[in-house]
Amino acid sequence: MQASPDATRIYPLDEFYQKAGLPLPPMTPIAGSEVPEPYRNLLVHARDMTPTLEGAYGRNIQLHVLQRSLSDGVLSREVVLIPDGSAAPAAFGVIKINLERFSEHVRKLVLECQQPLGAILRSEDIAHTSRPDHFFQVSADALIQRALHLSEPCMLYGRRNVLLDGDSRTLAHVVEILPPTNGFK
């Protein structure tokens, strides 16, 4: 699981698009300080996205898996995070999870695809750090519009994040893209 050195190819999002035979949507790298509010508060920090969204929406966050694959001990998922009681997604994401870094019990939870990884890390009290290393603007293409229930293209914001265990080994690479903001408590 290696990150692409080309900032315009946001790993692992680029792999999902390549597998689907689609070009990446127009993306522009930006500094965290250039991310406008309220997106900045939701993206520019060293926390997991699940608890951040739970705080913003005042509700638990549910996982909806759009697609998944397993290869060489790595679970790849394209997902939408949805606040309890809502039909509107709070985030679209792609994640590659290194299953070998987890105990058998946690691997089972991850493979069930019933909870966001951040919720599992919290409930299982797994020491880890979140290291966002790239922020960007993205023009929502048909794939992102469909995932986030958007009726037309618009400019969105996202981040690439790396989750590390207590020994600084990679647990997961994730790209998180937020819809137009609404529904906060």
Image: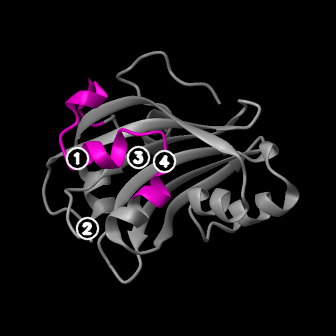
Sequence-wise first label, 1 or 4: 4
Viewer can see residue 18: no
| Amino acid marked by disc 1 | Ala
In this rendered view, identify the residue nearer to me: 15 or 5: 5
Judged left or right of residue 28, residue 83 is right
The residue that appears at 25% across and 29% down in the rendered structure is 33
Sequence-wise first label, 1 or 3: 1
The quarter holding residue 27 reads top left
Residue corresponding to mark 1: 140
User: Which residue is most to the top?
Assistant: 5
Q: Position of residue 177 (x, y in %)?
A: 34, 47
In this rendered view, identify the residue nearer to me: 15 or 28: 28
Residue 161 forms part of the magenta stretch: no
Disc nearest the viewer among 2 and 3: 2
Judged left or right of residue 162, residue 7 is left
Q: Position of residue 1 (x, y in %)?
A: 65, 30
Disc nearest the viewer among 4 and 3: 3
The residue that appears at 78% across and 60% down in the rendered structure is 106
Residue corresponding to mark 2: 184
In this rendered view, identify the residue nearer to me: 89 or 37: 37
> Which SS class for mark 1?
loop
The part of the chain drawn in magenta is 25-52
Question: Residue 94, labelled with which disc?
Answer: 4
Looking at the rendered image, the quarter that the C terminus falls into is: bottom left
Q: Rounded to the nearest whole Å, what is the CA distance between mark 4 and mark 2?
A: 23 Å
Q: Rounded to the nearest whole Å, what is the CA distance between mark 1 and mark 3?
A: 13 Å
Q: Rounded to the nearest whole Å, what is the CA distance between mark 1 and mark 4?
A: 15 Å
Residue corresponding to mark 3: 176
> Which SS class for mark 3?
strand
Q: Rounded to the nearest whole Å, what is the CA distance between mark 2 and mark 3?
A: 18 Å
Whether tag 1 and tag 3 are in contact, CB under 8 A, the answer is: no
